[in-house]
Image: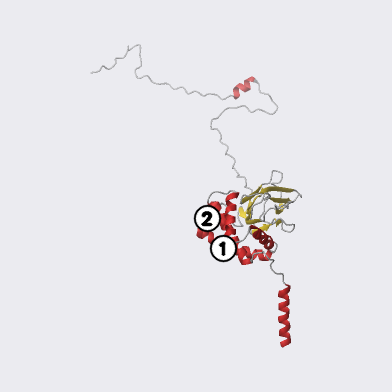
Amino acid sequence: MKRLTSYLIFLALLLMACSPSRPRGILSKQKMTDVLVDFHLAQGMAEAQGDNSEVTRYKFIQAVFKKHRITEAVFDSSMIYYSGRAEEFTHIYDNVVTRVQAQAERMGLELSQANQDKFAKLTNEGDTANIWLGKDFACVAATPVQCIYSFTMKADSTFRAGDSFIWRFQTLFVGRSMNNEAIALLNFYYDTDTVASVTDLLRNSPKNELHYSPGKTLDSLNLRSITGYIYLPIVKGADQPKPLLISEMQLIRMHKEKPVEVAPAPIVSDSTEVDTVPEKKGERLTPLQVRESQPKERKIHITKENPNPIHPERGIPQRNRRR
């Protein structure tokens, strides 16, 4: 029994020794969570001031790094490290989202914007619905493995011919670089093997939307699937683009409005009787028939009785004199 216990302890120590440890210079999960919470809150405060310039946002980011006594390079390396480990990154960001929402409500940030957003409270039902099924956040970095985020959604019975779509998300580069540019792409695949696409260039705007509406040649076709990509190009040289955070993703589907059916106007017949001569097909009327077919004016002769008639034999009647 002692041998078995000793063997199990030795095996556990061996597994712990062989498990990959966090590289030097990479923030712990708890520290990374704390930094990301302040990172997002700083962006909210920058937007609340009404100045969305890159310089202002960068100042708030630097204040976060200073608070946690880390460098921008350490944060970049930590983002790349954790974004390549899906399970750990998901656990970190779940905690970040929960804490940011609670803290933002206490600070009064982003609440007015949420109230003004007509898509903020959409469900997955109705003519206009949020049908997003993927995760709410992602991160892309300028490495061969992590430079692309993608999703695929197959059409189901809730899709209709002529549907329009809006892919909405927020983006944030975690540092400054001359090459901070990413590409967003949506592809729509139809029954006839027709593919329609819409693209957008992502720079420093935090809010992004890709709008798509089918044209006349596609609005009667059934949609089979949708694919989306966000690609961060890798450039030559030392000034690589910074990691890009993607959050609050939505895919809004809008059904095509049905045409309003208008009832035909009732036929109102004229009560005036007009004597007409029916015209036989191919037969030409004579001038007499044409004249007789015109509406005839009927005159009524009314004879008024003269209150003071003149009778030659009686003379002119005397008028009553005023007294």
Would residue 121 be visible to someone looking at this image?
no
Q: Image check: 152 left or right of 169?
A: right
199 over 141 or under it: above or below = above
Residue at (71% x, 87% y) in the render: 2
What amino acid is labelled 1 in the image? Arg
Relative depth, front residue between 3 and 196: 3
Q: Position of residue 178 (x, y in %)?
A: 67, 49
Residue at (71% x, 75% y) in the render: 16
Quadrant placement of the N terminus: bottom right
Query: Would you call the spot at circle 1 few (<14 residues within 10 Å), some (14-19), or many (20 or more)?
Result: some
Give residue 132's mark: none
Would you name the residue on which mark 1 appears?
Answer: 99
Callout 1 secondary element? helix
Farthest residue to the bottom: give it. Answer: 1
What amino acid is labelled 2 in the image? Leu
Relative depth, front residue between 143 and 133: 143
Distance CA(mark 1)–CA(mark 2)? 15 Å
Query: Would you call the spot at circle 2 few (<14 residues within 10 Å), some (14-19), or many (20 or more)?
Result: few
Quadrant placement of the C terminus: top left
Residue at (60% x, 24% y) in the render: 293
Would you name the residue on which mark 2 appears?
Answer: 111
Relative depth, front residue between 323 and 75: 75
Looking at the image, is mark 1 or mark 2 nearer the viewer? 1
Q: Image check: 306 left or right of 217?
A: left
- Earlier in the chain: of badge 1 and badge 2, it is 1
Q: Position of residue 296 (x, y in %)?
A: 55, 24
Callout 2 secondary element? helix
Relative depth, front residue between 14 and 282: 14
283 over 310 or under it: above or below = below
Q: How has the structure been colored for display?
A: secondary structure
**Quarter where residue 287 is shown:** top right
